[in-house]
């Protein structure tokens, strides 16, 4: 059962600004970590009109902006610290 629900925006702006790197990162995670994350990819999270800081991810229902590979790794480690 996944402890973390992660949705990565694949909209044009997010994809160009780092969403593609986030997707590649998640797909390369080791199986022992990946099994605890329910990852989906959204064609758009609808945030570019509200806040202009892509790429966006939704983590357990919370929208996060300006997400980098380093930020995502740090956040996932924190979310899964008691699991892996």
Image (cartoon, rainbow, N blue to C red):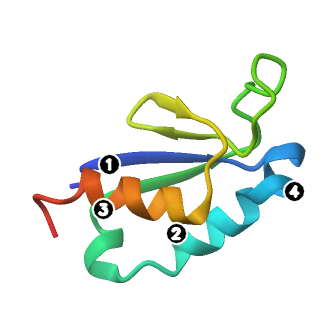
Q: CA distance from mark 4 to mark 3?
A: 25 Å
Residue 52 in the image: state x and y as whole percent.
81, 29
Label 4–label 2 contact, CB within 8 A: no
Mark 3 neighbour class, 10 Å CA radius: few under 14, some 14 to 19, many 20 or more: some
Q: Secondary structure at mark 4?
A: helix
Between disc 3 and disc 1, the foreground one is: 3
Place residue 19 in its image quadrant.
bottom right
- Residue behind mark 3: 77
Image label count? 4
Q: CA distance from mark 1 to mark 4?
A: 25 Å
- Residue behind mark 1: 4
Q: Earlier in the sequence, mark 2 or mark 1?
A: 1
Q: Residue at x 38, y 36 (%)?
A: 60
Q: Is residue 19 left or right of residue 36?
A: right
- Residue behind mark 4: 16
Label 3–label 1 contact, CB within 8 A: no
Q: CA distance from mark 2 to mark 1?
A: 12 Å
* Position above or below: 78 against 44: below
5 or 82: nearer the eye?
82
Q: Earlier in the sequence, mark 4 or mark 2?
A: 4
- Residue behind mark 2: 26
Mark 2 neighbour class, 10 Å CA radius: few under 14, some 14 to 19, many 20 or more: some
């Amino acid at each position: 059962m996944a402890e973390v629900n992660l949705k990565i925006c694949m909209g044009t702006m997010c994809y160009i600004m780092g969403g593609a790197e986030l997707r590649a990162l998640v797909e390369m995670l080791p199986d022992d970590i990946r099994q605890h994350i329910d990852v989906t990819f959204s064609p758009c999270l609808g945030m570019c009109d509200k806040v202009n800081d892509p790429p966006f991810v939704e983590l357990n229902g919370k929208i996060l902006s300006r997400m980098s590979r380093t930020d995502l790794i740090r956040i996932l480690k924190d979310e899964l610290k008691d699991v892996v």
